[in-house]
Every structure is written in C-alpha cells, then in structure tokens.
Amino acid sequence: MKHRTFFWFFLPTGLAMLLFIALPIVSVVTQSLFTPHEAVLVTVETCTPFKCTQETTIDQDATAAIREAEPLGRFVGLSIYFDRGHLAIAEVSEAWQTRASFGDFFNKLNNLPFYRAMGFTLAFTFIVTPLVILMGLVIALAVNTVHARLKGVVIFFSLLPFVITPLIGALVLFWMIDSRGILGTALQWMAGDPSLSLKASTGLMWISLMIYGVWHAAPFAFVIFYAGLQTLPMDQIEAAQIDGASRFQRLRYVIVPHLMPLVTFVALIQLMDNFRVFEPIVGFNASAHASSLSWAIFNDLGGETQQLSSAAATSVITIIGVAILLSPVLVRTWRDYKGKV
Amino acid sequence: MSSPANKMPVALRFASTVFVIAWLLMAAFPFIWTFWGSFKVELDFFSISDWTNAITGERTKETHGSAFTGAGYHGAWVEEGFLRNVINTFIVCFFVVCTSLTFGTLGGYALSRSGFRYTFWLLIAALIFRAMPPITLVAGYMLPFFQWNLWGILPTTIIVLVAINQPFTLWMLHSFFQNIPKELDESAKVDGCTQFQAFRHVIIPVMWPGVITTGLFSFLLAYNDFAVTSMLLSEGNRTMVPQIAAFLGTTQTEGNIMFAVAAVVSATAPLFVLVMFFQRQIVSGLTAGAVKG
Amino acid sequence: MFLKKFAIAGAMTALMSTSALACEISARVSIVGNEFPAIQSVGAGAQACTGAEVATNLTADHQKINLPGMQGNPAEYTSAIVANSSIVALMNEDVIRPLDDLVAQHGQALKKNQLITIDGKVMAVAFMANAQHLVYRSDVLEKIGVEPPKTYEDMLAAAKMIRDQGIMENPVGGAYAAGWNLAQEFNNMFLGMGGTHFKPGTAEPNINNEAGVKTLEMMKALSEYMNPDFLTHDSNATNAEFRAGNVAIMNMWGSRAATLVSAEGVPQEVVDGFAIAGPMTVGGGNIPASTLWWDGWTVAKNISDAEAEATFIAMMNGIAPSMMADEEIRTQAVWLIDGYEPTEAAVGVFAAAGMDTIPYPMLPYMGLLHTALGNELADFMKGDESAEQALKDVEAAYMAAAKEKGFL
C-alpha cells in the first residue's frame, strides 16, 4: 500500500487518537512538570452565618500578576515525581539508612502512599492475570465437552460476569459479601466464626478484590480460548492419539501450543487492565485496605482542592509501568513482525 | 470434539460436569440474587438485621403487605424517569459502535495491508494509548470542552469514547484483516480497482464476522463506561451507569438504594438479550481470527 | 432522592401561590450544584423566572465540574451552589465575583447573616445551615436508664452498658468510611479537643500534638463499639444500620435527620425511639465536637454584568421567603431564609449553632489537609500503626500536597 493511500485510510482513526489521547498525554506530561505558583496569603476578616473570624485567604490581586507572567505555573522539573506522594526518594533513602531489618524497611515503604498503591497494583496484576488465564482455559475445556444442545445456555451464563458494568458488578458483590449478606453469612457459617467479616481485614479484602477480578475477567479469557478450541487441528490430535499420547499429553503438546497466541493476547489485555485496577476499589469501598495507581489519580482529582500535577505525575508513572510490563510481549511482537516482513 | 477418539473417561466427564455447574452458579448467582432482591425494600435487600430477611422479605411484607414490591422499579422508571437515561445510553452506544467500526475498519485494513515499518510503531503507539487511565484523559478534557461549549452533550462523549476505544478496535481488526488473504484485494487491484474500491467491493463483503465481534466489544465499552460518562455528561444527558451511581447518594444526599438496584437489573436486561442473540457471532468472529495475538 | 420530585412540585406550588412576586430576567442563567432536595428546591425556584433561559445541572459530581465550568470566558455556569468547604476551590482560582453592588440593588430580602463576607466583600449568599449532632434511640437509653449523652465520654459509657446488657452488639454508629467521612469525624473531634488545624496565619499543619493523639484515641475507643466494617461505612451505610435497629447512638448530619426514619420498612420501635439532640463535647472542653456548615450560592466572575444581574435575581427567587410557607420545603433543611420556623428535625443544628460550634475552616489549603487525613488515618484505625505515626504521616502527606499547590 502506498504511503498516500495509507494516510487517507488511517486518517480518521489517527486523528481521533491524536486529538483525544495523544494531545492529552502531552498535556499531562507537561502538567506533571509544572505546579501552581506560590500563593500570596493574607489574613482578612471573614463573616459566615455563624460568626466573624480572622481567616487566611489568597490575595488574588497579587497572585493574578504572577499568574499573568507565567501562565503554565512554576517549572519544577521532576520534583513532583520524587515527592512523598510519588516515588518519595528522600523518605525511601531515609528508611533504608535507618532500617533495623529488611522487614522494617518494607513496613516503612508500605507506609508511603505510592508504594502502598504499587504493592496492591502489582499483587493484583500478577495474581489475577494468571488465574484468569487458567480459569478461562479450564472453563473453555469444560464447556467444550458439554452436550451441543446445552452449549448455548452455558456460554450465555458464562459470559454474564464479563458483560456486566464493572462498577455495578463490584457493587453487587460488595452487597453480597457484607457480614450480614448472603455470602458473608455463608462464609461465617463455614468458618464457624460469627464475627468473621471480609470488609474488616486487609488480607480478606485483598482476597475479595482478587476474586472479583477473576470472576469478572475469566469469561473474557474463556470466550477467546473457546473460539480457539473450535479451530483445533483435529488431524494433529488424532495423530497424537494414534502415537499413544495420553489426554494430558495431548493437552500439553497440541492444544496449549495451538492456543498460545491467544494466551498472549489475553495476557496483554489483562496485564494492562489489571494494572489499572480501579472500579472494584471504589465499588468495594476498599480504600482503607487497598489502593492502586488509578485510585490514587482519582483521589487527587476528587478532593475539594484538586491536585492536578500530582495526578498527572501518577498517570505518567502508570503509562511507564504498563510499558515495562508489556515489554516482553512487545519484543515478541516485534520479532514476529520482522519475521513476516 | 465429538470424534469417538475423544470419548472421556467417566471420572473426568463427571469432574468436568461438576466444574461447569459450579462455574455457572458462580457466574449467575449474583444476578439471580440481585433480581430477587430488587423486589424488596432496602432493609430486606441488605438484610442488616437478619440475613434470612433477604429471602423471606420480612420488612417488605410489613410495608407493602406482600413479600414482593415493584416500588424500586416504580421509583426508578416513573418518579425518576430512568427511560431518558436508557435512551441516552442507546444513542451513545449506537453512534459509538458505528463510528468506531468505520474508523477501525479503515485503519485496521490499512495497517494490515501496508508493509512499512511505521505500521508496527503505530500499533505499539495504540497499545500505549490504551494504557492511559481514562480518568486522567477526562480530567484533561474538562477545561477545553467547557471553553468551547462542548461539555455535557452526547456528541462530545461519543467521540471521546470512540477515541478511547480505537486502540482495542484497531488491534482486533488488524489481526482479523491479516487473516483475509492479501491475494483477494491484490487481484482486484490488478483488475484496475483503486485500493478503496478493492476494499469496498472485495473486503467489505467478507469482513462481517470480525466486525460484528469487534462491534460487540465496542458496544460493551460504551454501555459500561463510567469514568467518561460521569464526568462529561450534564445531569439531563446522563446515561444509565452514572444515573445509577447518582441513585446511590453521597455524604449529604440521601441515596435511594432500591432505585439503584432496580435500575441495575433494568440496565442488565439488554445485555442479557444482546449476549443471547450474539453469542454465536462472538465465538465465530473470534474463531475467524479477530484475535491471533 | 425520591424527595426530589416532591421538592420540585412543592416549590412550584409555593411559587404559584405567590405569583405576585413575578421574576423577570433578561440574560441567561446557568446553575451548577449538588443534588439534594433543598438544592433542588432552590433550583426550581430559580427556574420559575421568565424572560430568559435558566438551566440547572444539579449533580453529586458538582465539585469536579464547577471549577472548569467557571474558568472559561464566558463561563458556562453563571452560578455555583457551594458549601463552606467547596467555596474555597472557587476562591483560590478567582472565578467568583463580589456581590456587594447586587446585594444593594436586589438583595433587600436578605438577612445580614446570610452574607458570606470575606475581607469586607460579599462572596456568597448562604441559604441553609448544617451540622453533625447526636441521633439516638430514646427507648434504648431509657432501658439502660441514662440521659442522652452530652459528651463523648458519656456516649462510651452508654455504649458499654448497652453492649453489656446484651441489647445491641455494636450500639455506636459513625460514618468512619476511609476518605472524606473519616477525615470529617477527625475534624469534629479535633476541634472539640481544642485543636486548631494550622499554625495561625500560615499553612503549616498543627495536628501532630496532644489534641491530635487524644482525638485519635477517642475515635479508636468509639470504633470498638461500632460494626467491625466501620471503615467502609459512609453516612448512608451508617443510617441503614440505625434504621435496621442495630445502632442506638450516633453522630449524624442534621440534613439527614428529617428522613432518617421515614424510609420504607423501618421497624416501629426504631421510628418511635428516634430522637435527636445537640452535638456532644469531648475531653472536658465546652466547644462541641462538630462543625457548622452553610450552603450558599455564588456568581461567576467571567460573565457579563447583565448575566450576573439576571443570575442574582433568579437565585434570589430560588431562596424567596415565600418558599417557607411550603411544609415540604420547610422540612428539607435548616434554612437561613427569613420567615423560616424551625421544624422538629432542626433542633440539633440549632443547638450546635447555639453552643458556639466552630464552622468548618474556610481556608485555601483545608481541602488538602482533609484529603491527607482521609487517606492516612485508616492505618491507625485498623490498628496497624500508632497515633503519633498516623499524624506524622498526615502532616507529611499534607506538606507534599501543599508544596505542590504553592501554599508552603
């Protein structure tokens, strides 16, 4: 295809992505390097319906002049990235120098919001992603053996957790796992502990969030693998069978290799989505126990005073994190691509 | 896998059946439970005093004289006019799917037919774009949208959702088109067609399985989106999901959870219908190669 | 929420009955604000004006959109309905205008205490007040033979008795959900302990001290008598516990008192036992452990004078004294409007105002401290770290944010 033709074909999608994703990314990167000007504070009399008091406020006339001169704000380089809300360079090095033991160091690290968020984000990503793939594969294999008449119904119900709106799905599960909800009560009964509450303990909350993650995403993996199973090379399977390969060997040496490109695809999408985990934390009201990078952005933007620079820095870190996570997949795609050309 | 060579041992068949049943229970139970609970009053739905209330509907009986009540549905649909939100959702979904697919097929086709190196980097860029948390993107849109008076209306939300959805659409369709033999359109071009005519007359007729599957994914994204719709739509133009979130209430606002629950059930019903009609297409579209890594 | 429609209907009838006060405007009005019933009534009142379009966008997300919506020129919104916490963001960015001239021209119906005056300039017009105060079950307290608690120490003692006598397992309610709610409970208690959030005249935090530690200890003590999931309970969930009859004493928003037991399916004993009283004090202090709030409206800066005038007139119509004749509207809030006769549900807020409760601080950097408190206190409440460490974390998190925003 000629460059010119390609250009016209690609223009609409390219323009949409350029305007609504690339430009905002540029502005987010810029935003993360600048902060608002120093505020000129004055103390003035403030009267409310209740009483008059001396309160501090911003001297708008003085501040406006500074803003006029440099509308982007103060250039602060990477200092937002290094402050306590993000990489916390000073706090981490102090924790390292004063560490009593490695455990103590990690405790101190875990006390910093960025590392706490990163801890949960990574745990969620690396536990949920393989479980989703495994669960999806097992469901696909099991559904594939179901009688042809029932397949439609089974596939239908299997897809439900994936199609449901994530926030709503999380809410529904959150209502059910309440210690007085049906699942919560069932768990108390099974554990023989009437005071058991999934929402009161950090560990159990993490497990609940991860189970939700698997529940929600497994159908996605399932439907992709199931489609892959429909194109299995039957001749190879039969050949393997004639050679005396056991059921497990056939799975291991024929079916799984056949599905491998699909596994890569699912892993790619899941790594990315799980790294941005957000809705379950909001839906489960879990911010006391777990936070993630996306949640940190949400929190910066949702306060009474928005912290735009801080949110921007976390966003850039998220993109870099995803790029690192995906790098093995990217390298593989690049090799494939070069092989093809 | 119906060939006799694949006959399963009884134990394995049994285990597999049990597993399927267990999975179906896991997948479907929350929906059944919510559906059942949507006909109760809030205190029963949450069964804060006793968990059996959710089943028997003690408090519902006391209030409405029967263990079931349509009060939640009446509240959501009649008092709060949920229909308006439903219509908005379908407008948004329809245009998002159509626009996404138009942009995506053109772009995906071009990427699959051009051998130049930049196609690879475009695909990688699209992947990186997809990594951006939507919530940050949205925060960046607010000021310009207000400035240009574009905030709050459906078209703005539609084009933003299309853009956010493009990376995934491009990847799906790119790999799908790669599985359509190049010879098809090459021969058309030899016969004197331009690239676009080749696309129009040769590719379009055979691309539907992949396009439908990709379209379904676009539909789900638009239907389920919360981050974009809740921030970019004004109160009067809300789609279903932000409206349900609004039913839940905030610190100062008394929420009405049962309106939300009834709305959740109502919002899930179209998805049921969708999956029921299209599950075959999803599978066949995927099988035809919309996903090949 | 379901009150919304009644509210609008109510406002309409109120306005129709007083059609003598016709409201004519000549330029566009566009209002952004929260969505609770009282604000819906104000919005409906403003929309009754004729002559030009009056648009409203009343949504719980108002805080995220009011600033960008007023920063443009001309601004999308000509008026934002705010509270003492959220007006700060608008003042920090200088997007609202002084109202002195308009008050002189069109504001004859306003009482002096409705004017929010900063440095001698009227920046907002308040129309309702709010505060957190005691809500309790009189039947339960009678059963254990105690008076409604006047202090948090009394509350703890009563809670212990209720639990020991096996009446309720977790008798104390509290909106302790991590985030905004938890921070707000800290603010209440901290002010009650005699603390001040900042070193006077500066943006330096001042919470890592004895008052702060005592505050956290009291909160921890109370949480022992709460449902173990308290860190996920916002005010909605806390109210649900009260309605289910699981909670006998709690500190709750005055604005929620009117509808607390009118929801469907609330057991009769809860309806009968429901009672409210003023806020409690703590630690032997005489300032209540609560904060006073007002809600009011502002007018955007980046709009023409004609639009500002139209907005002012329309908003004045939204808080017209004639609305107070409507029973439905009267119970929606503790109104500051002339002619308002307090209802039963207003007792707690009035008591709070009468006891010299401190208003929620209207400082440019208070929002940052509030966010920091909400994020960092959960570790202490879970029992994972000491009070001193939690307060140190709050100060550190706040300092990082305040440096970024240029306050330090």
Image (cartoon, rainbow, N blue to C red):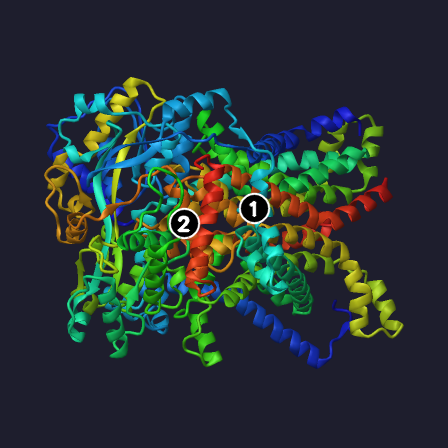
Q: Position of residue C251 (x, y in %)?
A: 26, 58
Location of residue C310 in the rendering, given as x and y in whole percent from the top left corner: 25, 23
Q: Nearer the viewer, mark 2 or mark 1?
A: 1
Residue type beneath disc 2: Ala
**Chain letter for the residue marked with disc 1 in the picture:** A
- Residue located at (19% from left, 51% from top): C352
**In the rendered view, does A242 fall on the left or right side of B145?**
right
The N terminus of chain A lies in quadrant? top right
Task: Give the spatial CA distance, label 2 vs label 1.
Answer: 30 Å
Q: Residues within 10 Å of mark 1 (few under 14, many from 20)?
A: many
Q: Secondary structure at mark 1?
A: loop
- Front residue (pair C95, A95): A95
Q: Is residue B168 left or right of residue B275?
A: right
Q: Residue at x 31, y 74 (%)?
A: C169
In-front residue for pair A15/B114:
A15
Q: Which residue is mark 2?
A: B245
Which numbered marker is on residue A86? 1
